[in-house]
Amino acid sequence: MSDRITISVIKADVGGYVGHSSIHSDLLETAKEKLSNALEKGHMVDFHVTRCGDDLELIMTHKHGTDNEDIHKLAWDTFLACTEVAKDLKLYGAGQDILKDAFTGTVKGLGPGVAEMEFEERKSEPIIVFMADKTSPGAWNLPLYRMFADPFNTAGLVIDPTMHEGFVFEVLDVHGHRKITLSCPEEAYDLLMFIGAMGRFMIRAVYRKDGEIAAAASTQKLSEIAGRYVGKDDPVLIVRSQSGLPAVGEILEPFAFPHLVEGWMRGSHHGPLMPVPFYEANPSRFDGPPRVIAAGFQLCHGKLIGPRDLFDDPSFDEARKKANEIANYMRHHGPFEPHRLGLDVMEYTTMPQLMKKLESRFKPE
């Protein structure tokens, strides 16, 4: 029997409790019931349901490969069932990430975020699933670069012979609908040229030089799908660890620095990405600041052994303290940039409606 396994992490905002701060337990229970039924019928190997902020997160393992219609349909039906519960409870933004009326064979392009990877399960297979709220997929660029290309973060790039050759990054141009593959360390400067522009260029996957998948991120942008602001994307990320890949500590280390990301209030502001334990993933101050949680699992023949709450650790207390200091500093800017996003991004918010209302009052200089 093959040990090849697929892990699919699919998320959606189907209703907030209260406002955009968290999720009601009835939604979690509905999702668990739907996935339990599928597990009993043999459609999956295992699953775990959780949440980050107001986002429902479905973590599933199976033998069907990536982009499987049955797995995506299961996630879609689960989100629809949870949306009905959210509507009954009059939760805020019920069905917010359900942007299309009909399933089309994949949830990609319909609103939910997706990260998936398929691989041969190793003798020991540690995996970390990162889930973020109040931010966009570009938030993973800096951490992924540091995990897989920065020797000041990842000692294994220097001293581990199995990692010394570096890694390959697949970068998506979300505006141009195209991708490029760049190899590090030899093309590190080219990679940084692109991924520093986090709103447009996003790391979608990382591979070892032998082609082995190391990380996979969701890159779906709601504004690109809807053509307007309908909520932030709240991305997910899967990272494999150890034995020729970065150690767990090297994967977590980038989040000790709460770097600035776009999102926060109304998806229109820059703020620090705060690493928090599961129970603190309730962004409420100015609907933020943006949060990230890390669920650690050991895979065993596809079974999800875990999760371990990897940010429930006092060594990240300073990062949380720094994030609050940064939040104070940014908030004092009020409606001014750089707290508020640049005009190119604000075009996807309600700002164009206000501009149109005032258009007739502009006079030639």
Image (cartoon, rainbow, N blue to C red):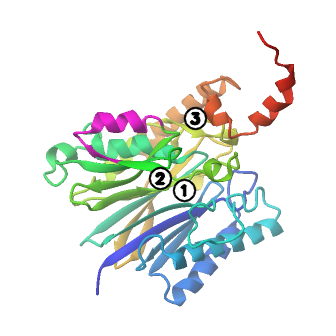
Residue at 60 percent across and 61 percent down: it is: 112
| Residue farthest toward the bottom in the current orientation of the protein | 41
Secondary structure at badge 2 equals loop
Q: Mark 2 and mark 1 in contact? Answer it, CB < 8 Å.
A: yes
Q: Is residue 302 placed above or below 341 in the rendered structure?
A: below
Q: Is residue 160 placed above or below 364 in the rendered structure?
A: below
Secondary structure at badge 1 equals helix
Question: Crowdedness of circle 1 by 10 Å Cα count: few (<14), some, many (20+)?
Answer: many
Label 1 sits on residue:
278
Which of the 4 image quarters holds residue 15? bottom right
Q: Mark 1 and mark 3 in contact? Answer it, CB < 8 Å.
A: no
Q: Is residue 287 placed above or below 329 in the rendered structure?
A: below
Label 2 sits on residue:
312
Asked if the magenta segment contains residue 123, the reply would be no
Residue 232: give x, y in percent of width and height. Answer: 63, 48
**Mark 2: which amino acid?**
Asp
Residue at 47 percent across and 41 percent down: it is: 317
Alpha carbons under labels 1 and 3: distance apart: 20 Å
Residue 357: give x, y in percent of width and height. Answer: 86, 30
**Mark 3: which amino acid?**
Gly
Q: What residue range appears in magenta?
A: 181-197
Say which label, 2 or 3, has the lower sequence index.
3
| Residue farthest toward the left in the current orientation of the protein | 161
**Mark 1: which amino acid?**
Phe
Determine which of the numbered discs, if any, sits on residue 148 in the image.
none
Number of dots carrying numbers: 3
For residue 28, say whether it is visible.
yes
Label 3 sits on residue:
271
Alpha carbons under labels 2 and 3: distance apart: 21 Å
Secondary structure at badge 3 equals strand
